[in-house]
Image (tube, rainbow, N blue to C red):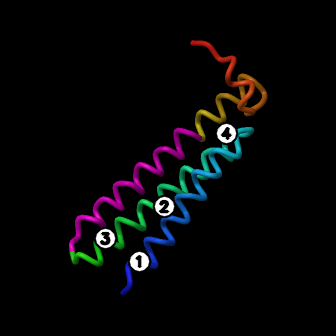
């Protein structure tokens, strides 16, 4: 197994996630998708390190990151629904006016 290929693939996913966050600032759900892709890249790094070093710790961290990603998606979806019910839109420009 050549880990360089997998690290390169993970780096490409991370860079595309950062690019997606910087370029798509209009809609909140579209902004959250690149964050999930960056978490996927971190998971793949953990798994490659785990397999290459013959250690189970990377797989444990990968399951932890997957759990955090699922929780982030659930909380983000709840925030989207509440924001849409209150404001009628989920555009980022209208959220800047929220004061609390």
In the image, residue 97 above or below residue 68: above
Element under disc 3: helix
Of tags 3 and 1, the one toward the viewer is 1
Q: Quadrant of the N terminus?
A: bottom left
- Magenta extent: 55-76
Residue 38 percent across, percent down from the top left: 51, 56
**Label 3 to label 1: alpha-carbon separation:** 11 Å
Q: Nearer the viewer, mark 4 or mark 1?
A: 1
Q: Are marks 3 and 1 in contact (CB under 8 Å)?
A: no
Q: What's the residue at 41%, 63% (across, down)? A: 43
As drawn, is 99 to the left or to the right of 4? Answer: right
- The quadrant the C terminus occupies is top right
The numbered mark, 2 or 1, whose residue comes first in the sequence reads 1
Q: Position of residue 82 (x, y in %)?
A: 64, 29
Q: Main secondary structure of the magenta part?
A: helix
Residue 59 part of the magenta-drawn span: yes
- Cβ atoms at labels 2 and 1 below 8 Å apart: no
Badge 4 or badge 2: first in the primary sequence: 4
Residue at 47 percent across and 55 percent down: it is 39
Residue 63 lies, with reference to residue 98, above or below; the image says below
Question: Which of the marked residues, 4 or 1, is nearer the chain's N terminus?
Answer: 1
| Marks 2 and 3 in Cβ contact (< 8 Å) | no
Q: Which mark is residue 28?
A: 4
Q: Is residue 23 shown left or right of residue 100?
A: right
């Amino acid at each position: 197994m050549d880990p360089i290929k997998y690290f390169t693939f993970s780096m490409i996913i991370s860079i595309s996630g950062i690019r997606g966050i910087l370029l798509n600032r209009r809609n909140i759900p579209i902004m959250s998708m690149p964050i999930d892709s960056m978490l996927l890249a971190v998971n793949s790094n953990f798994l490659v390190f785990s397999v290459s070093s013959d250690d189970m710790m990377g797989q444990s961290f990968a399951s932890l990151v997957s759990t955090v990603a699922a929780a982030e998606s659930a909380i983000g979806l709840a925030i989207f629904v509440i924001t849409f019910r209150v404001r009628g839109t989920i555009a980022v420009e209208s959220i800047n006016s929220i004061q609390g």
